[in-house]
Amino acid sequence: MSSLTDRPSVGPTDLAEAPSGPIDPARLWNLFSFVPGSRPLSVWVDVLRRLPLSFTPTRVRVRVPGEDVPDIGFDDDTWHRSSTLEGATSVRLEQVENAGRDDERVVAVLQVTVARVVHEVLLSHVEANPELLAALLEAPGLIGGSRGDEQDATWQGETQPQHFEFWYPHDWQHLPRTTDRHGREIIDVSGHPGRISNVVGWRMWAAQDDWYGPGARLYVDLDALATLPLGEVTDLGEDRWHVRLWPDGASFEQIRTAQATLREHLGYDAAAARDDEIYDLITADQPDDPMFVAQDGTFDHGGTTRILQYFSAQKRPTFRSRAAWLEILEFDAEHHQVHSEVIDLRTQPHPEI
């Protein structure tokens, strides 16, 4: 049986998904990131609920790490009250067709997430109306935003060959391969300029429309926008910028060239390489309340990596401050598990580790 790496590679950027015309609303994402701690979840909801939405929500979903919060029908008061639930980290409005049936379909989403290193507003499947866009651009702590084809970005960043085998509708066998830290073969996406780079605090994406705020200076050199050799750059004032990276009707090659140029010109990959440094910067003034801790060293049971993960009484992942259980795992240098231990924090103190 031949390895995937034996198959020919003719270049990684020709996944035929990039649209040349206006983006299909079913594939549209408007994604904005902000400096963590810049605005509480309840304030975000209070601001957004005063604005006209581009869709008609039918239900509200709230995430409280460690707890199972049932979905609730949408109304303005419910939306606001849900954001004040203790421990809530996200509120998601959905417009659903055929709710509760086997063919239920989510046709629009507005989700606000406020967590330790993620402070994000996502509007999907619909355009952002001018009032909402203005509110996002004027919000404190703006890092950046993107409006683009989420399906294209997803495939540009997909690393698992089996996902291509099951769901990708075009040829993909030529894509180059690499291995992950465990030695498993994956797709090498380093040459895919349309991918989203998940840098701590900001999903960096060279989409058709891109916005940058003062917070982006933690990641990239915004002054370089003045010399961007393509696209339309607009100074919005107060260190906020808009880049229309390519026009509707651009060719596939023009789109990929524009994406690669923006990523290189602003230093997206360099920002990804500074992930640990950026993490320290954006969490410096925040309390240390992790859900998950990874430690390297030499540990009691022969491991070189120790993982601490916190769970609620319902055995769901949660923050340390709300945890009822602590799971401790150790792995050796070959990534084999050598120890597993569960501590009931309701009856035992947290170990000094």
Image: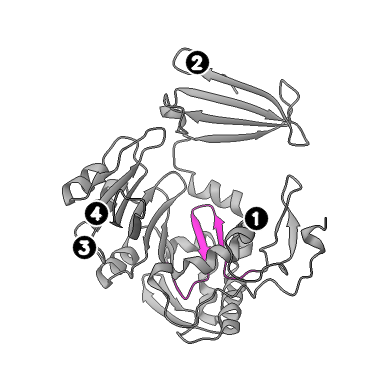
From the top left corner, tell me how far across and down residue 197 is, in percent: 57, 60
In the image: residue 323, left or right of residue 8: left
For residue 176, say whether it is visible.
Answer: yes
Q: Is residue 210 magenta?
A: yes
State the CA–CA distance, disc 4 to disc 1.
35 Å
State the CA–CA distance, disc 4 to disc 2.
44 Å
Q: Dot 3: what SS? A: loop
Tags 1 and 3 in contact by the CB under 8 Å rule?
A: no
Residue most extreme to the top: 347
Rendered view: 209 above or below 91: below
The kind of residue tagged 2 is: Pro
Q: Which mark is first along the chain, 2 or 4?
A: 4
Residue for badge 4: 58
Rendered view: 332 above or below 43: above
Q: Dot 2: what SS? A: loop
State the CA–CA distance, disc 3 to disc 4.
17 Å
Residue for badge 1: 162
The kind of residue tagged 3 is: Leu
Tags 2 and 1 in contact by the CB under 8 Å rule?
A: no
Looking at the rendering, the stretch of residues picked out in magenta corresponds to 192-212
Query: Which label belongs to residue 51?
Result: 3
Q: Which mark is first along the chain, 4 or 3?
A: 3
Q: Which mark is first along the chain, 3 or 1?
A: 3
Q: Dot 1: what SS? A: helix
Q: Is residue 308 magenta?
A: no
Q: Which mark is first along the chain, 1 or 2?
A: 1
